[in-house]
Image (cartoon, grey):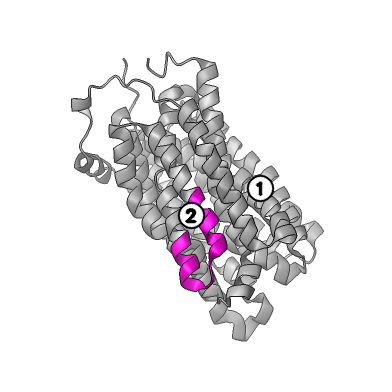
Amino acid sequence: MTKAAAPQRSASLVLAVLLIAYILNFLDRQILGILGPSIQADLHLTDAEFGAIGGTAFALLYAGLGIPLAYLADRTSRSAVVAGSLAVWSAFTALCGAAVGYWSLFLARLGVGIGEAGGVAPSYALIADYFPAERRARALAIFSLGIPLGLGAGAFIGARLADWFGWRAAFVIMGLAGVALAPVLRSVVRDLPRAEPESSQAPLGAVFPILARKPAFWLLAFASSASSLCGYGLALWTPKVMMLSFGLDLVSTGNFLASLLLIGGCAGVFAGGWLADRLGGSDRGWYAKLPAIAWIVSVPTWGFGLFAPSLWIAWPLLLIGNAVNILWLGPVIAAVQHLVPRRMRSTASASFLLINNLIGLGVGPWLMGRLSDALKTSYGADALRNAAVACLGFYLLAAVLMLLAVRSLRTSWVRDEIH
């Protein structure tokens, strides 16, 4: 059965279960941000050390293992790889609650990254299998709602769990929830039979050379990386900015950020997928133009929002900022799927994510924290807010690179095979 023959109800159920797993993926990331001040106080961590835990530790193996795990998924079972990855990252999330210092928490987050390395790229490929090309960007955008939903839930639920039980229990509770979901995902999400015989599956070394010859791949990857550098930094550090600069307590910060992420983030992700499907049918260049426009808008909305004189002014500005800085997900992920033939999609997605996560996740949170430490002698409590605004320039770099990708994306697009 090919994706064209997959019942719509089955496709929707698969998408729903994968979405829940993806929500837990980002909930496990954001919970670290909302718990950051408590963790830093208990474990005596500098901003640079906490930034390394929130980004570099996670990204080291998360990025590097993504390609071999995606290749394994393409060669065997994508659903089995996703379910196994969910169990591993959730177990290590629970272990974060046992951390006693910098290195124990660093190693636990390293383990979370190992698990999450196998979750995303095979999920992209499963969704691309189940949904036809004309609805694929929307389906991938719905899946990508897991990012704002997970970030929002992480802020909201994490703040309450920490307030009630402490930050250690918050990690344990959320980790065990993911472990429980893993067997459910394995039983519900099934791989579709593939039209290509096993012998036609591309060897691992054959995928990246195809991508490497396409300027569109490099421009999409580095543009998204520049955006993610700022985006991941903001995701980790905005909770602390709200507490330091606006005087919010833990629960109030969770409520404020959850409202921004759930409303703005979800609207932005869905709008990106919907607009890409609407405009990209006649001009594939819109898959690159839409993110570029959104990133340009991100800079003033985030900049003025973080320095707003009151929460009433900050909220609408940051709402727009949270919508437009995440709009790229549906268009760009769909575009990457179409740079290679169907049988190579998981590996192509992992190649894209390798670059995006090494730069964006590996550098962004640490760089923002390092800048904050460097600025403390001059700006005091405002150092972190100034460091965040300084990093907004990466959104402009991302926009320039994405506009350069428009022409090459049109010529590099690979249409679906006809079965």
What residue lies at 68% left-to-right and 78% top-to-bottom?
381
Q: Which residue was labeled with disc 2?
A: 92
Q: CA distance from mark 1 to mark 2?
A: 19 Å
- Give residue 249's position: percent from left, percent from top: 77, 65
Q: Amino acid at mark 1?
A: Ala
Q: Which mark is residue 318?
A: none
- Answer whether residue 107 is magenta in the image: yes
Q: Which residue was labeled with disc 1?
A: 153
Main secondary structure of the magenta stretch: helix
- Give residue 221's position: percent from left, percent from top: 38, 49
User: Where does the N terminus fall, quadrant-wise?
Assistant: top left
- Answer whether residue 269 is magenta in the image: no
The residue mark sitting in front, 1 or 2, is 2
Q: Earlier in the sequence, mark 1 or mark 2?
A: 2
User: Which quarter of the picture shows residue 46?
Assistant: bottom right
Magenta region, residue range:
90-108
103 left or right of 235 in image: left
